[in-house]
Amino acid sequence: MANKLLEVKNLKQHFGTSSNPIKAVDGITFDVFEGETLGLVGESGCGKSTTGRSIIRLYDITDGQVIFKGKDIHASKSRQELKEFNREMQMIFQDPYASLNPRMTAGEIIAEGFDIHGLYKNKKERRDHIGDLLEAVGLNREHANRYAHEFSGGQRQRIGIARALSLNPSFIIADEPISALDVSIQAQVVNLLKKLQKERNLTYLFIAHDLSMVKYISDRIAVMYRGRIVELGEADEIYNNPIHPYTKSLLSAVPLPDPLTERKRTRIQYSHEETTEEIKVHEVLPNHFVYGSDNQIKKWFK
Amino acid sequence: MSKKLLEVNDLKINFKTYAGIVQAVRGVSFELYEGETLAIVGESGSGKSVTSNSIMKLIPQPPGIYAGGEILFDGRDLVPLSEKEMAKVRGNDIAMIFQDPMTALNPTMRVGRQITEVILKHNKNVSNAEAKDRAIKLLDLVGIPMPEKRFRQYPHEFSGGMRQRVVIAIALAADPKLLIADEPTTALDVTIQAQILELMKDIQKKSNTSIIFITHDLGVVANVADRVAVMYAGQIVEYGTVNDIFYNPRHPYTWGLLGSMPDLKNNVKEELRTIPGSPPDLIHPPKGDAFAARNEFAMAIDYEQEPPMFKISDTHYAKTWLLHPDAPEVPIPDAVQQRIDGYLKEAEENGK
């Protein structure tokens, strides 16, 4: 098995006051292995974006540990160490319209990272590298001088990807990178992400609510519900053999481009059952984890 | 066959902009029968929303221009109607469900009032109390629990899915014959989307409403539609029953759309088929077939002359030169064909 690149241990992220906390993420544990894509799915408000943002230090976490390449990310650090870490981990955002500064050209947006980290000595080297990155994401060198509004949604998302790649990271958190795009453009961006992963040995945390794309791009899938990971396993395993009733309900709601089965399909409703028993993570099958009490697991897994 | 409710003939809509005249809809024709659902699919900018808004005459004029064609609703042409006459059609005959339930409702009005407003406006002889009764029944019909209590609440007290139910209740308030739903589930989670789709189908069964369903999600189309129109660059490029479009697609753009969805069932891990490039500029629509530049099967004639609608069967039409008797035989791309075969095989096995 590949090395663990990232370990998340009992991560908690609460907002609001301590007397009335909003538990956006409430104790989740998972690992991400080098070179894989871990898909994180769930409905809006389940805490999947918060998880991504906590990992990359956009929030100060409430409790738990995030260990990246053996180092605790949230432990206090010198500026130098922080810079080092920022270089390793980057993020791609959901909305390609809101995540690019309208007053900067594509070249400036991509180069902002180099400038902060002082990676290039002269202008020529810097310009060449911007051009290389633009080409890597399927744009032209000439696009460097254009402003964000001159690009279409799909092209903007490519600029967002080029920016994320600019510091040669090993780990990229993609927070719903395709939900704002058209179907045919989604396919282009997903193909690009896969190609870059192969070329640069990247590891992705792919956050999305669209199960079909997640299944397609991910090696493993984690399903989140109300701030907890309720099921985690290999993508095919989760898709073909879901055990937690929430996962089943989620899968039954994904519409497929196949009218004959769509007509006959019955949706499974999920109603959350509270239990007083101790709830923990069970490994029901090898590498297939389900969150629930002993009795629940027995009931679900026949 | 049931009665024809709506007939759109060669509709053309232009918009005047500083850059020039945008030809957003370039000659669209379709018809809709009572109790059926027509899905219009296409990418953003393909003209699907403009088409549906134009049926409601919601295109602001200026900058919009009805440049030609007719919209026959129950045999009456809507295009020349005045704003006053149109106000009677809207809500009463045709109602619309908008994409974003967050912005479609008035945040300063109680939900109940927003529904009774519609009822009172369209029926002069309904009393306030009767209107309230009907509004509560509507809330109940769209599956909102505790309708009496919800009646007095404001939109911010509702979740996204519940708000979309309210929007549907408002659309149903005056018993329209035609419901236009413009991406009604795009802003919602998959689980909520499934509930809303089920609700719309339920309502259709009960009241025999016709629905025009606009979406870019082919999965949703497969779920709700009886017939499908695929739009590209302001024109319908393929038109047929839902089975025609999904199991026997003939237009290369439809192949592209189907191929760009990941295939979950047959478990193919290969690259997604994409449609290269981006849609054409509709200020200067290209000569010939608008899709030619992105079409890997384009022929010389595609750049010269616009293809007509070729008839494939009584229900199925496509606008591509590939269907001309002199054109070389181009089979459906393997990846798409494999997927279709997989679906059909599974359906056969399930049938046994």
Image (cartoon, grey):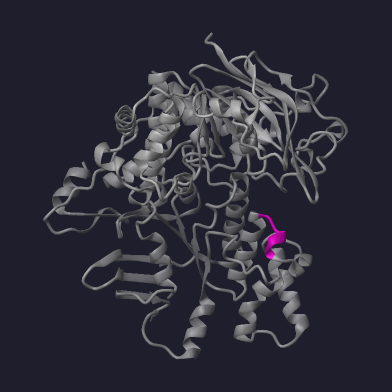
Task: Say which residue appears at 80% left-offset and 34% top-offset.
Answer: B289
Q: Quadrant of residue B306?
A: top right
Q: Is B308 on the left-hand or right-hand side of B98?
A: right
Q: Nearer the viewer, residue A169 or B169?
A: B169
Q: Magenta includes B144?
A: no
Q: Residue visible at 37% across and 80% down?
A: A74
Residue A161, horizontal then vertical, whole percent:
60, 64
Image check: A100 left or right of B177?
Answer: right
Furthest-top residue in this view:
B1
Task: Answer left or right for B46 relative to B297.
Answer: left
Residue A172, given in percent of the width and then of the height, sits at 51, 67
Residue that extends furthest to the left in the rendered view of this protein: A276
Tell me if B321 is positioned left or right of A180 in this view: right
Residue nearest the observer in this picture, B19 or B290 = B19
Taking A75 as reference, is B193 above or below it?
above
Residue in the foreground of this view, choosing between A176 and A230: A176
Q: Is residue B4 visible?
A: yes
| Image height of B142 relative to A122, above or below | above
Q: Position of residue B45 (x, y in %)?
A: 67, 43
Name the quadrant containing residue A62: bottom left
| Boundaries of the magenta span | A148-152
Main secondary structure type of the part rendered in magenta: helix
User: Which residue is pictured at 74% across the width and 22% down the height?
Assistant: B309
The x and y percentages for residue B42 are: 62, 37
Asked if residue B191 can be seen in this view, the reply is no
